[in-house]
Amino acid sequence: MTTSTIDAPAAGCHSLVLRLPAGADPQHLLSGAMPDPVRIRQTSVPAGADAPTAEDRRRAESLRPIHRDGPPLRAVVLRYTDGTADLVLVAVRAVVPPAALRRIARRALGGAAEEGGVLTGALPGVLPRPPATAVPPRPTVGGGPVPAQRRGPEWGLGEPELHGVVGSARIDLGGLGEQAERLFLPAIALALSRYAGGDRTELGVLDLGTGTGDDIDEVICVHAVEEHPECSGAEFLRRFDREPVTPLPPAAAQEPPAVGVVLSPAFEEGRYTAALAPVFPLTVQLDRGASHAICRFDRGSVDASVAQRFCAHVAHLARQLAHGAGDRPLADLELVPSAEREAVLRTGGAGGADGTAPARGRIDHTFERVAAARPDAVALLADGDRLTYRQLNDRADAVAAGLAALDVAPGSLIGVCLERNAELVVTLLGVLKAGCAYVPMDPHYPAQRLHFTTRNAEVPVVVTSAAEFPPVPGVRLLTPAALTELGAGRATTDGSPPDASGDEGDGPAYVIYTSGSTGTPKGVVVPHRNVLALLRATAEDFALGPDDTWTLFHSSAFDFSVWEIWGCLLTGGRLVVVPYWTTRDTEEFYDLLVEQGVTVLNQTPSAFAQLVRTDQRVRGELALRLVVFGGEPLDVRMLAPWFARHPASDCRVVNMFGITETTVHVTAQTVTPREVAAGSRSVGHPLPGWSVSVRDERGRVLPPGAPGEIYVGGAGVADRYLGLPELTGQRFVLDEATGERVYRSGDKGRLRPDGRLDHLGRLDNQVKVRGHRIELDEIRTVLLGAPRVTAAAVVVSRDEPDDPASSRIDAYVVLEDGYGVTDPADVLAHAGAKLPDYMMPTTITVVAGIPLTINGKPDVSGLPDPRTAAAPADAQERPAAQAAPTADGITDDILSIWSKFLNTPVGPQDNFFTLGGNSLLVVRVLAEMRERDLPRVSPKQLYEHSTAAQFVEYVRQLAGAAR
């Protein structure tokens, strides 16, 4: 690959390099070729080890463009030490077209008689400076000025700091013979379709003609490219030939397609370059009749290795189209040859590329070894409880003994529905010690969801302190104290669970339920060995050990808690359990981090964004050395103020991509200020023992850069979905490419040439909202179950695109009898009985019908703005004076703060959460109140006083008590 630097006019210039006859005088040869003389500069090319080669000089001179105020033609003679010489002609293509350049070349080579002597009509005006009308301020391409920077293909993976540096690669068309030109454009179009993920894309074409005429109209035409899998290769070629191309209008030519072809006439006289810089961010030049093509690209838009692969794939597809592909379905044509496919898989860690052996063992046995080594070290801090490793181990043994007293069979699933406290961790460990697997349930979930999980998992026992846990026939409900009492005197001395699976770790450790597209949650069964593999893959890199203090911040029903609990306790650290309301009060949580000297913190980006704001205001002495992000995509730009106070050398920040079905984490990317400045979307390399690859809709491996579905293999792949064999077979598949079992994630991503992964969102109807994975179809199914609802649609919106706290779930419903004053509230109440808070719609809008696309899918763009579609019933009846500001300063302040963060006018009777409030916005509201010197209020109090009038009265009482 070679490189050069883009100059703005270069795309509108072309060049020709000629080997001069021995002893030729180029000035004399060209003197009669044009109506005005052209000054020829001559230079000698020095020899020597340090001197540039002849090829370097030829190339540099042939790619040096005409400046805006210069003459439209430049001639330079390069003389070499062996007596040979090259004539390099560079011209503005709009003034000196290819046909004119050919006649000049033939004159220089002694062919004046054949061309009729003096060249006429090629150069308007008088050289060396033609009229302003002849040479525009900037050379034009496609009827418009060439912009300074253009958007490259999504899959290009260029480095922005290399913008303006041109790379080149060769496309070998050997073996295609006379078919080369006919097959070339379709092969590029097909490759482009595959690289673009099968979506409709565009291929630009700039045809410079056959070279016989002087008048060329440089208009970029666009092929609308869309692969038709049902076609044969021959039919695709016929379609490509007859489908019309669309000229790009001059205004649009300033932003031409990201990939295009320049078709140029063949030059037998010398080496011709049709454009000195890429006309498109990735430009392929094909000289008619040539056996190869040249790809030139802006390295700010396209990575060099990606461009080289693209060129190889174009040639590979062209050869398939030429040889035997005529009757084959187009979809059978392979983009990536088999040898390269294996190399790409190894880049992503497939096939045991990192040499990591499978993990073995059980979580509880590993904990017991840590406890035996550090019996008196503090293991757990929670609500005043302080447990050493010995105490935690003994109390967990008592829980295991209690389960044994109930004759619970090893391998059973045990429900655990507890608040975040010491009893939660003790119970989870005790369940594992009993040879069982835990099924965590959040006590804040609706009763119907708890009931469903209990029945679906077929648990014989639920350990809970919830007073109103829904009864399920045949299921025993026991408090942790009652369970421990049952096992009094029966705890084993060695802690070995009575299971028959030995210490291999093949049995399940937990079953966590995630949102399901069918309208019901689905349980993911994860074995012990997966968790141990996760710790083995990260402990050394993250330097996890006894000196660390972790927090248990997340719900046990969220798999981030698996990493927090066992990541800490299996490496000898100290685990600080964060109470529920402290997790919702960022300032209180920040104080806990400082007080406890927390060193390892795990957060969703949404939650950490609030912590960054608190850190800027409070500026406490944090002991953090490692921050791990997970649960949702990270916008690295939010970390700029964090790095301003906490250098990357003091606190390592790691962005990790993961899925419940692949055991919490899959990849890791250390984030530094460099990634922040670049706006990186990388989630890093796969962890040792894990693998990632990107596939198309047929499961075929895609090359680096091309977006597709992320497949995850290796040590983290879960066993199955509980009781769902059909869904398990669809998502947990045997990979034909590697022979390994992999999980089809449904996430969209692209692999980078160095093996790092970019996460690009979801392919299906699943979303992440504040760290929680949500199937919108589950919400839709629940809404359809409400009385009188005949149709529904659910979308996720953001009031501020860059602010995850502004995310909201908007629902639209069609009712049997049309609009009704209380109907939306009834539907909301129905949803609240089945869905957890994080899945509840922020708005429910009644519409006459759900608009559909031509494919029969909901047309989201046709849905009304929920903020304006229909005001809530109480707002319709509210007297105008009631919503008006009052003379009370506290009332005015609170109404204005709520209006600011809820992005809608707020009246005294409005409910914060009905208007779209969520836990993150609660934190922002309370922070704004402190900035306005209003009394400090805890998040719990806002939840308990959620209407504006109630909250104002509560704040007024606090203010009065403070006087």
Image (cartoon, grey):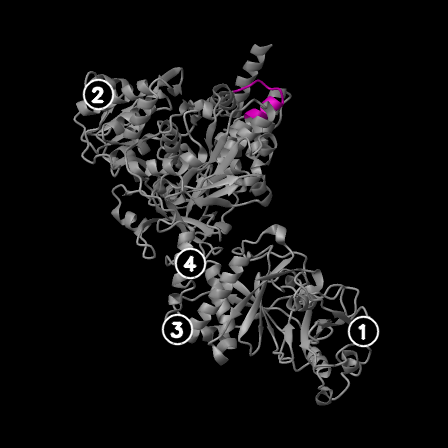
Picture residue at 41% right of the left edge, 32% below the top: 837
Residue where numbered disc 4 is placed: 855
Q: Earlier in the sequence, mark 2 or mark 3?
A: 3
Would you call the spot at circle 1 few (<14 residues within 10 Å), some (14-19), or many (20 or more)?
A: some
Q: Earlier in the sequence, mark 1 or mark 3?
A: 1
* Residue 39 disc label: 1
Residue 25 appears at what percent x and percent y?
77, 80
Q: Kindly report the distance in space between the C-alpha atoms of the residues bearing marks 2 and 1.
A: 99 Å
Residue 152 in view (yes/no): yes
Q: Say which of marks 4 and 2 sits in front.
A: 2
Q: Kindly report the distance in space between the C-alpha atoms of the residues bearing marks 4 and 3.
A: 31 Å
Picture residue at 59% right of the left edge, 24% below the top: 619
Q: Say which element carries label 3.
A: loop
Which quarter shows the C terminus? top right
Question: Would you place residue 524 above or below residue 241 in this image?
Answer: above
Which quarter shows the N terminus? bottom right
Q: Kindly report the distance in space between the C-alpha atoms of the residues bearing marks 2 and 3.
A: 70 Å
Q: Quadrant of residue 394?
A: top left
